[in-house]
Image (cartoon, rainbow, N blue to C red):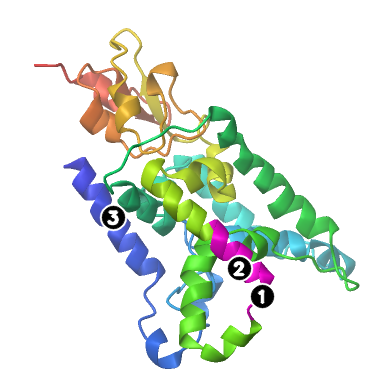
Amino acid sequence: MMLDIRRWIQIVATFLSNAWLMFPFTRTIYQGKLKSICVPGLNCYSCPAAVGSCPLGAVQTFFANLRPSFATGNYHIGLYVLGFLGLIGSLVGRMPCAWLCPFGFMQELIHKIPSPKIEIPRILTWVKYAALVFLVVLLPIFVVDFLGYGENWFCKYLCPAGTLQAGLPMIYLQPQLRGLLGTLFTIKLIILVVFLLAMVFIRRPFCRILCPLGAIYSLFNKVSVFRMVHHPDNCVLCKQCYRDCPMGVRFYEGANQKDCIRCLQCLRKSCKYGAISYEVAGALPVEKKHPVKQT
């Protein structure tokens, strides 16, 4: 039942993030008042159906405008974006990746395509933190034009979600843009194709390897109000939680690891020994009160 609920929530969240259904007629990007509000998951601002802003793009814009903002004495611009991410992260950690992110939802669906499944080296899961530090923070601050403005490096040069949700649809809606395509778009298209193919064989490869938004949320996993709990006394090391996890997390090695997206699949589907539960604000683990025993 929990899995069905999560799927429905993912569907609704994807629709709500892309609810501007007039784009086939306007052939432009929605620019209404809702665009000033960030959505919790990765969803490109420039997608013609998007009604909100991508928090990752908003963070980059904040850092890209930081130097000219300070030069003009505006010290508060964009801080609401950091507060928005901090609030979500402090409450539920990386849970939005499992429940509210359209791009994460798409990866899970593509991974259902029958194929040999492979695992990635754990060291690759640290790449997203390098992307966060360099592409989202440092380069937008320090590589600037003559006016002091930086660029949204991750969105402009790398993000496959942007290519899929914004680049390709806008080329279709506005054919005059096709003549402006160059090497950069070709490179981004190759990156998108590589990740689409990887999604068939690897569990949520973009989320695990490259997503800076997931990296931000993961920083709160061990300190958030909602946390997962592991009960080693009940654990029999069957590793079913790892086999079922959409992120390849080995829960039996400890709760609240950086890639745990709190999808609750391990709790509701995998573990039949009462070794997994969760707690809210340090309260007694909910599932510990009524552990599920194998029959």
**Where residue 292 sits: x, y (%)?**
17, 20
Q: Which residue is mark 2?
A: 186
Indicate which disc residue 207 carries. none
Does 10 sit left or right of 219 as displayed?
left
Q: Is residue 27 above or below residue 108?
A: below
Closest to the observer, 262 or 29: 29
Q: Are marks 1 and 2 in contact (CB under 8 Å)?
A: yes
- Indicate which disc, 1 or 3, sits on the residue closer to the N terminus: 3
Indicate which disc residue 182 carries. 1
Secondary structure under tag 3 reads helix
Q: Is residue 57 above or below residue 205?
A: below
Q: Amino acid at mark 1?
A: Gly
Closest to the observer, 174 or 253: 174
Q: Is residue 263 above or below residue 158?
A: above
**Disc nearest the viewer among 1 and 3:** 1
Boundaries of the magenta span:
181-191
Q: Residue at x 53, y 45 (%)?
A: 214
Closest to the observer, 51 or 166: 166
Q: How dense is the environment of label 1, judged by Cα within 10 Å: few (below 14), some, or many (20 and up)?
A: few
Q: Are marks 2 and 3 in contact (CB under 8 Å)?
A: no
Q: Which residue is mark 3?
A: 9
Magenta stretch containing residue 184, yes or no? Answer: yes
Q: How dense is the environment of label 3, judged by Cα within 10 Å: few (below 14), some, or many (20 and up)?
A: some
Does 254 sit left or right of 117 as displayed?
right
Magenta stretch containing residue 39, yes or no? Answer: no
Q: Quadrant of the N terminus?
A: top left
